[in-house]
Image: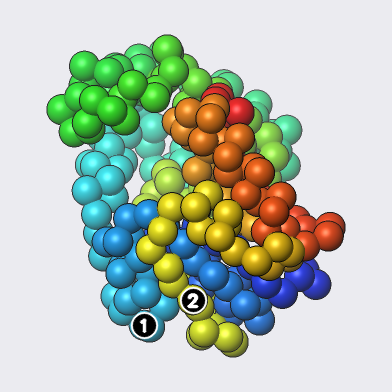
Amino acid sequence: REAFAGRSRVFCIAAAGDTARALAATGHVVTAVDINPRQVAYAQSRAAGGLLQTGVADRWMARGRGLLWSIGWSRAKLDEFLNLTDPAAQLDYWDRRLDTRRWRAAVDTLLAKPVLRLAYRGSFLDTLPRGFGERLRARLRRGWGLHPNRANPYAANLLLGTPGSEPGPPVNPIQFICADAAAYLEGAPAASFDAFSLSNIGDGAPPAYLRRLWDAVKHAAAPSAMIVAQIGRAH
């Protein structure tokens, strides 16, 4: 919301609809696109006031949180960590109290390809880098050094399962479209969007697709457009 202040026409990856709803609630005109029709249908339902649904990943995360005690992460430790407001202090706490040998072993074991193969298709697993668990732990640690935990709803959701606050109703209706992101932007009129929220679409995408997506964004972007994205190793 801060990055897009003053920009009205937003292209957004629909996903579960949370970002699209939050942006539409602040007055942006949002076009939410996703290649998965079930994602689009769910995002539309949530935008219309539908209930939050628990998916497979949510259930696995909940089970994982229920086992945090086994690696020495007590609720008291997590509460103390999540109440910190200084990113430097958060990194220090993480390194001393939470980044334990048992935590590292658990993550690396659960994110090993033989284990992931029980739940995910081979085509997805082929996109994962070597040492996926180690990379995820490094990305997580980097995040603790960027944002004050007490004001970060994503931190509380990740570690405790605390739900985030619901955005208000959209000021403008959200346009939901089921399509490939690059294909949709290629077919859009030039300079159609003032801002782009691309989520983690770059994670696992092959370099050729990322180049195509970037060219499509440049085509559809108005002058001085803003882009927010999480780009994976393929970039």
Where does residue 102 sit, x and y in percent of width and height? 36, 17
Residue located 69% across and 40% down the image: 146
Where does residue 149 sit, x and y in percent of width and height? 61, 47
Count neighbours of disc 2 (C-alpha within 10 A) and say few if under 14, some if 14 to 19, many if 20 or more. some
The residue labelled by disc 1 is: 49
The residue labelled by disc 2 is: 175
Residue 116 to residue 228: above or below = above
The amino acid marked with disc number 2 is: Gln
The amino acid marked with disc number 1 is: Gly
As helix, strand or loop, the secondary structure at mark 2 comes to strand
**Mark sitting earlier along the chain (2/1):** 1
Count neighbours of disc 1 (C-alpha within 10 A) and say few if under 14, some if 14 to 19, many if 20 or more. few
In-image side of 103 versus 188 (left or right): left
Residue located 42% across and 12% down the image: 130
In-image side of 61 versus 210 (left or right): left
Dot label at residue 13:
none
| Front residue of 170 and 73 | 170
For the view shown, which residue lies furthest in the left direction?
118
Where does residue 118 sit, x and y in percent of width and height? 15, 27
Q: How many marks?
A: 2
For the N terminus, which image quadrant?
Answer: bottom right
